[in-house]
Amino acid sequence: MEKIILKNGIKLLYKKSENNLTSFTIGFDAGANVEENQQLGMAHVVEHMLFKGTTSRTEYEINKLCDETFGFCNAMTNYPYVVYYGTTLDEDFEKGFEIYSDILMNPSFPVNGFKEEIEVICEELKEWRDDSAQFCEDTMFYNGFENRRIRNLIIGTEESIRSITILQIKSFYEKYYRPDNCVISVISTLSASEVSLIVDKYIGKLSSKLAIKSEYIEKKQEPIYENNKPGTYFEYRDDLQGGKIQYCFPIHELSDREICALKLFNLVFGEGTSSILFDEIRTKRGLVYDIYSKIKNETGIKLFTISLGTSYENAKMAIEIINYEIEKVKELKNYFDEKCILRLCKSYKLRKMLALEKSIQTSMNLCVYEVMYGGETEIFSEFKLMDTINEEDIMKVVNKVLVNATIQVLMPNVGSGR
């Protein structure tokens, strides 16, 4: 693994691969977290508009070139970052990187087609609402928090999306698409020097393309965190057949060591088909098709969540069992012994390394870890930290985290019977 700082301040992360594919990710600290309240959805709209054309290429030309050059390519806006990524053959890396560099450095932000793209994003918003699991999570965030950015969708609201102007898009772009705000990761069989030359050739001039205003070079603002509003919240919809239930617990006050302890605990509690939750609620009682818990440690999110799908009739019992199992695990003794922890560490490392086996996944993870934490080594350093975890560490974090849940219940509307 190598980290190279280009002359304009861009961080380039390089990792050698063993196939003839090159995957790369270009990321910016320009996700939804940096938006002002009146700009909800701005980061996502900018991502869309960058593909509408450059000073030398039309939208159609960009799309055609991407189809011809990439085996896979995409872009994504999250709360803590926005990324542009893709995979090419080694011999096409320079071509692919030039295309993305042109998109990111020379956007034309055309007025022609802007209204149509806004309509596309509004349609995308409807699709978000059609996904019942996503809707349940979004509603939980809205009910569970007052000030966090996650209280509102990454994509924004229809009102906020339609209020965005080309002038605002240009201003956001100039403020956040800066070289000192950019990380590039490349996984390739090409040498580090070859990759560095190509990257510098096409994006090394980013600083000269943007007039960086002094007020934009400021200390990075930390996202707002707050404790959740505990309670059980109900939402009913006429268009649902089955229901969804989600829990969340804040973890923003946990140290890196505590996060590692929580990850080991989660392998037992809610990750996999032999976990406590899956065994008690799915295997033994058949109340759900799937149930799992997850650690969302991204900047601005930082939550421990439980998610399941169940019927209206089984919802109450499922919640009762989950609450019972939560209290039960807080009293575990002599479960996480040295042998157990070694087994869990091995299982976690295996799952993590399998997830990183795809070069595009490794590229994305390296990039977003650097954007969020300022260190791509977080991906691998946690393995060493886990080796020092003991039962006391795990039980302390379990009792610290699993309290005062926000529970969101999304169920079909069954009329007055409810």
Image (spheres, helix red, strand yellow):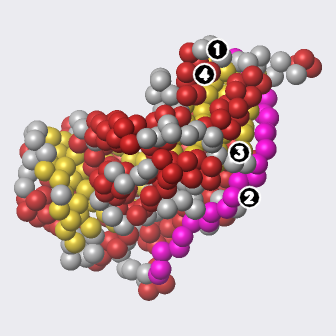
Mark 3: few, some, or many residues within 10 Å (few <14, many ≥20)?
Answer: many
Write down the region rendered in magenta: 218-241
User: First in sequence: mark 2 or mark 1?
Assistant: 2
Q: Main secondary structure of the magenta part?
A: loop
Q: Of discs 2 and 1, which sits in the foreground?
A: 1
Do tag 1 and tag 4 residues touch (Cβ < 8 Å)? Answer: yes
Residue at the disc numbered 4: 280
Q: Nearer the viewer, mark 4 or mark 2?
A: 4
In the rendered view, does 372 fall on the left or right side of 127? left
Which comes before the other along the chain, label 4 or label 2? 2
Q: Residue at x 55, y 28 (%)?
A: 276
The answer to whether 183 is drawn above or below residue 338 in the figure is below
Residue 211 lies within the magenta run: no
Q: CA distance from mark 3 to mark 2?
A: 15 Å
Q: Nearer the viewer, mark 3 or mark 4?
A: 4
Q: Residues within 10 Å of mark 1 (few under 14, many from 20)?
A: few
Residue where numbered disc 2 is placed: 146
Q: Which residue corresponds to mark 1?
A: 285
Amino acid identity at mark 4:
Glu
Name the quadrant of the C terminus: top right
Q: Amino acid at mark 2?
A: Glu
Instruction: Sort mark 4 into few (<14), some (14-19) or many (20+) by Cα contacts within 10 Å.
Output: some
Residue 208 seen: yes
Residue type at mark 1 is: Arg
Instruction: Measure the alpha-carbon separation of dots 4 and 2.
Output: 34 Å
- Quadrant of the frame with the N terminus: bottom left
In front here: 225 or 151?
225
